[in-house]
Image: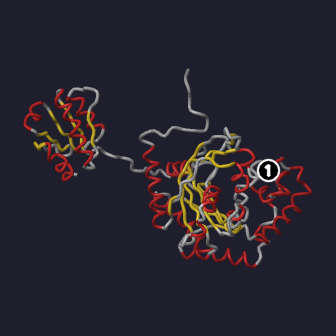
Amino acid sequence: MNINIPRGTKDILPGEVEKWQIIEEKAKEVCARFNYKEIRTPMFEHTDLFQRGVGDSTDIVQKEMYTFTDRGDRSLTLRPEGTASVARSYVENKMFGFAQQPVKLYYIGQMFRYERPQAGRYRQFVQFGVEAMGSSDPTIDAEVMGLAMTVYQELGLKKLRLVLNTLGDSDSRKTHKEALINHFEPRIEEFCSDCQNRLKKNPLRILDCKKDRNHELMKSAPSILEHLNEESKAYFEQVKASLTEMGIEYVIDPTLVRGLDYYNHTAFEIMSEADGFGAITTLSGGGRYNGLVEDLGGPSTPSIGFAMSLERLLLALEAEGISLDTEEDLDCYLVTLGDEAKLKSVSILNQLRSAGIRSDKDYLDKKMKAQFKAADRLKSKFVAILGEEELQNGIVAVKNMETGEQKEISIENLSAFIKQGL
């Protein structure tokens, strides 16, 4: 009986996994420059966390979560996103008391959503995300967007578009919510059942509906920009000015709605404009969520963050024809002839590896010619040959595969010779 991989998941094999490592290292390196520290949260949490933190009216909570009951009859959920878990950890570990504020965190981890698999979208996927918690300064909004753009640009992406909007403060959202209800309510029966359910709970989510996106009322819906109070307008202007000061181009889209309930003020997405990237162009998205920490039992904590899909980043790199350098050539391949040489090779390999030299040898009793072919396939810079005669004299014959030059080196000095040659 064959057991296949579950739908919506994928194996990442050698040759491909190196691309992921390059991306992850770039993200970590950029975060270090921006002074963000890594946080690692559990892969599953109490279901209540996501119901409260993400929002009951969202597709994630209503349709996409992997939820199960454990042996203690507790409802647990595989994390569908990272922000709620980070906020929970922020409250539980009293990070609001840290001397250094705001608390600037990043994560790289697997998330789980039960949705229809398609290019760049899986049921198990990897997100890189950033959260800056404890500051209401508009310049940190620009910093977070700048961090995301830096990761993309330093990996080589050029065809990017930063789309920006504001959702306003709570008063502005309340006024906008009333305007949306008045706008949609007379004809709400023309919309899908999800939109009908969202009308009173969170009418802003109607604007994010995929089924009814072409309905005529969508185009004439009241814009949040028309309902901003003076404080919200001033905040948005400072965010835009900060982006301009950083030399980051952006476009304003008043219809941009983030899919989670905890957002307010700044909302943004970064899109790929590469030819052939596909209908879904979003690479990452985020925004400000000033009420989430308080909703989870912590103090009032203004915060902002984003999450990017590594799967979609890889697709964008492919669409722009950018190949990541994943070549990791071997430093030294050890060719052995005879049983005694084979036994001695164990300690020689240990010596090389302890010295930080990437090295390997044959484990299939191949002939000498086949061992050299293996060294070629692995693009080994040096080949060290150990036969009975070399073993008796305490030496190895070392060949530089680039120049063809060959020297006899004592076994004790092999590591130093290879390191000098590298």
Name the image quarter holding residue 73: top right
Find the residue positioned furthest to the right.
186
Residue at 90 percent of width and 57 percent of height: 185
Residue under label 1: 212
Which residue is more in the foreground, 357 or 296? 296
Name the image quarter holding residue 251: bottom right
Q: What residue type is labelled 1?
A: Asp
Find the residue positioned furthest to the front.
72
Looking at the image, residue 175 lies above or below residue 372? below
User: Helix, strand, or loop for circle 1?
Assistant: loop
On screen, residue 52 versus residue 239, left or right, reads right
Q: Residues within 10 Å of mark 1 (few under 14, many from 20)?
A: some
Q: In the rendering, at what x and y percent does residue 307 appear?
A: 59, 57
Residue at 14 percent of width and 42 percent of height: 411
On screen, residue 139 versus residue 323, left or right, reads right
Which residue is more in the foreground, 93 or 203? 93
Q: In the rendering, at what x and y percent does residue 196 appear?
A: 85, 51
Q: In the rendering, at what x and y percent does residue 222 appear?
A: 81, 65
**Whether residue 68 can be seen here:** no
Which residue is more in the foreground, 25 or 46? 46
Q: In the rendering, at what x and y percent does residue 396 appear?
A: 13, 39
Residue at 68 percent of width and 76 percent of height: 235
Find the residue positioned furthest to the left.
393
Residue at 61 percent of width and 68 percent of height: 96
